Image (cartoon, rainbow, N blue to C red):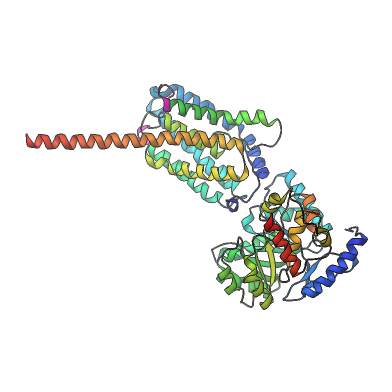
Amino acid sequence: MNRLIPYSGEVYAYLLAGYSDAYIALEIAVCLAGAALLLTGARATLMTCRIAGAVLAILWAWIGVGFYWLTYQPLNWAGFYFGWAALLQAVLILVWSLPGGRFRPTARIAVFSHWMGLAALILAALMGPFMRLLSEGSVTAIQAVGVTPLATVTATLALFLLNTTRIPFWLLPVPVILLVWDFIRAQVLGVVQDNVLLAAAAAVLVFLLHGFLRFRQSGEARDRRIHRDGKNSTRN
Amino acid sequence: MTISVRRRAVLAGCLAGVTASVLGRAVPGNAADAKLNKRIPATGEAVPAIGMGTWITFNVGPVPALLAQRTDVLRRFFRHGGGMIDSSPMYGTAEQVLGHGFEQLGGTPGLFSASKIWTRSTEEGPRQLSDSFRLWGVDRFSLMQVHNLVNWEAHLPMLAEQKRIGRVRYLGLTTSHGSRHGEMAQVMKNDAVDFVQLTYNIVDREAEERLLPLAADLGKGVIANRPFRGGGLPDALRGKPLPGWAPELGIETWPHFLLKFIISHPAVTCAIPATSQVGHMDENMRAMEGPMPDAAMRRRMVDYVESL
């Protein structure tokens, strides 16, 4: 695994510390926008849902260009490919969210999976400020939502879990690939705080996949029922 | 640039010279450089047996604090009479950081510059070479290698042309982690190849079976990469006792032990440990001093490490 990470933990800390600090205004704006989106929730209009989807897509595009291509790629050639992956995710989010305003997350549904999503989202949003407080001036790898990939992937998956419309399966591969990469990186470099976010993202992913599975099973059950009813009606 | 050489070290250096003469490849040194130099088979040119790798350690980006630290490491390397520095476009910003360091030092006495071409694209090869010249800030490379044998069919003729016009002095091929030894054995028969770079350390000794004897037969220089297994070997051996006979070889630490094992192999021209610490650089370079183990002692070294 070491061959995939051609830099040290120290260098990674310098990279993220400098990058996160440079875009702290973006981080604050993203957190405020996210809070407003969740509070508006299911009452949001088609237009606000479309805007929210577009903003999420722009953040992913920024992760691709600003982080992976302009910042990370000089350290690691793989950044070039991750940049393209993030841009692809931006396009997929646009394709999915714009037509029907399907990006409609809410914090107002009191089921366990939603609480899980909400917890992961808050964790992703607070990780940056928390690490800044904890680092006390030392150089620390700070993950910031909307600014660095891991926090953004975690927040995106959490928002998917909180969404009131069904999330298509094809929105998951890119975040999962980036999570796997971040898992490898975190283990090689021993970045403890990243493991916290990774655990939260993994838990959210489990709930999302469980949701897919349940939806598929209920769909199959419905199909079987329709098929059976159809047969019965033919006999009659 | 002067390093104090203790009397014992001078005597040990003379002993090393005798041992090295028996091995047939080392250069007998005088008191001023009681460090092991080895001859490049293609030309007979001498290079210090310990060089420096840059994988991970010099990929630090544009961070001023880290750039200054790496410049200190380079300064110490040259102060110890270091020669070979090996890098690659694959190592992120390492070539850029080297260039920055050279500029800060204002001179690179004895530099043996070694970089690589690392691309599947035939067209990209010359561009990458041109980038390396720019990033290192050199007019001529001592050695240019095809990294991990990637598209060597196209890059080797291109580099041979660069050698012909005098922009590159030696050509080489690299592999690491013990991979593709079969292919390396075939390609290194090419007359244009002066050097091979491969993984060789006291634990990873696959090269002893085929590539090292072949390199000796064909008259190719050998660069040993991953001498510490990416730092894993000194970590694993830390706290374990050195053998009682270690002082006979002037060995004071495990890195000395590990490096002496490598550079005492008759076919090895240079080992390239990487470090970001000035203290480690001092330690690495001291492995060139003192007597070198002969074949029987090398066997003993392997047995001892395996017994731990």
Please name whichever residue, B139 or A157, is drawn nearer the observer in this view of the structure: A157
Query: Magenta residues, as a range?
Result: A97-113
**Residue A224 within the magenta-colored segment of the rendering:** no
The image shows residue A165 at horizontal and vertical percentages of 36, 31
Q: Main secondary structure of the magenta part?
A: loop
Q: Is residue A126 above or below residue B299?
A: above
Asked which quadrant contains residue B194, the reply is bottom right
**Residue A103 within the magenta-colored segment of the rendering:** yes
Side of A134 where B246 appears, left or right: right
Q: Is residue A90 above or below residue B127?
A: above
Side of B234 where B3 appears, left or right: right
One can see residue B187 in this view: yes
Side of A165 where A59 appears, left or right: right
The image shows residue B175 at horizontal and vertical percentages of 61, 64
Residue at 57% x, 28% y is: A126
Q: Is residue B27 above or below residue B227?
A: below
